[in-house]
Image (cartoon, rainbow, N blue to C red):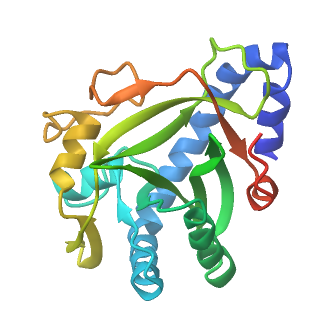
Amino acid sequence: MINSIKKFLKSTSWGRVLYQPLNNVYRLYSVPKRKRILKKYGYDVLKKVFEISREENLRVFPMFGTLLGFIREGGYIPWDDDLDLGCISHDADTPYKIADILINKYGFEFVRGFAYRGQVVEYCLSYMGMPMDFFFMIPKGDHMLTISSFWRKDMNYSHYRQNSVFTTRQPLVERLETYFVHDIEIEVPTNYEELLVAAYGKNWKTPIKVVTSIDDGQSSNRELQDDFSYILSYTEFLNKDFG
């Protein structure tokens, strides 16, 4: 229902004017709800994800705010409301293989996805009502790129599925090591400190409420792109309808 309303608003010029203030109002309800779910089920879901990852050899690992919280705080950051996970996308089928296992074998739900330049680069799944974002890192020699999508109110998109994009250049994840969070066994990149510096800057150990704007000055590794990603419903994801 909510996604249908967002789709409708984004598809008209007057709707795009109303979208941001209405979305801000909606977030007054949705964000506290997500935080409550994370507080209640966050570690149960974390345990489930990494048990599956080991069983199915998915090789997922925590990224961004989740990795930051686990390394710096020893758990989720108090103001976080979802689980950020990374996976190296060795080919275009990687996101599909992981989605097929998690959705069809373990009952995860598909919320939305994002495609960029003909490739799935991110999707959000839900388990026990808790959202988790999967980022599919694209290897580029000695580094990798993470593609992040966001909606800009000052952008005149030609289609409601379009989103703006920034890329984050990060050190390549080659190996994972065992790590424990609240006595839960997970796997983290061996070079996690380099990843945190790339994402948040050299002062990543200083606790602040992280702003998600590309202009927040956290890292010089972020670059705004001049083309767009496309949001995906589950049907569009399955049909590879990338806009």
Q: Who is closer to the viewer here, 93 or 112?
A: 93
Horizontal side of residue 233 vs 76, given as left or right: right
In this picture, is 70 found above or below 194? below
Tell me what residue is drawn at x 34 percent, y 47 percent: 64
Give coordinates of residue 41: x percent, y percent.
46, 68
Give coordinates of residue 215: x percent, y percent.
38, 18
Tell me what residue is drawn at x 72 percent, y 23 percent: 19
The quarter of the rendered structure image containing the C terminus is: top right
In this picture, is 228 found above or below 113? above
The extreme front residue here reads 141
Tell me what residue is drawn at x 28 percent, y 58 percent: 173
In the rendered image, which quarter is residue 198 located in?
top left
Tell me what residue is drawn at x 35 percent, y 64 percent: 61
Horizontal side of residue 133 vs 157, given as left or right: left
How many marks are shown on the rendered structure? Answer: 0
Give coordinates of residue 116: x percent, y percent.
61, 41
Q: Who is closer to the viewer here, 209 or 158?
A: 158
Horizontal side of residue 196 vs 102, given as left or right: left
In the rendered image, which quarter is residue 190 located in?
bottom left
Q: Who is closer to the viewer here, 152 or 157?
A: 157
In this picture, is 95 found above or below 26? below
Give coordinates of residue 63: x percent, y percent.
35, 53
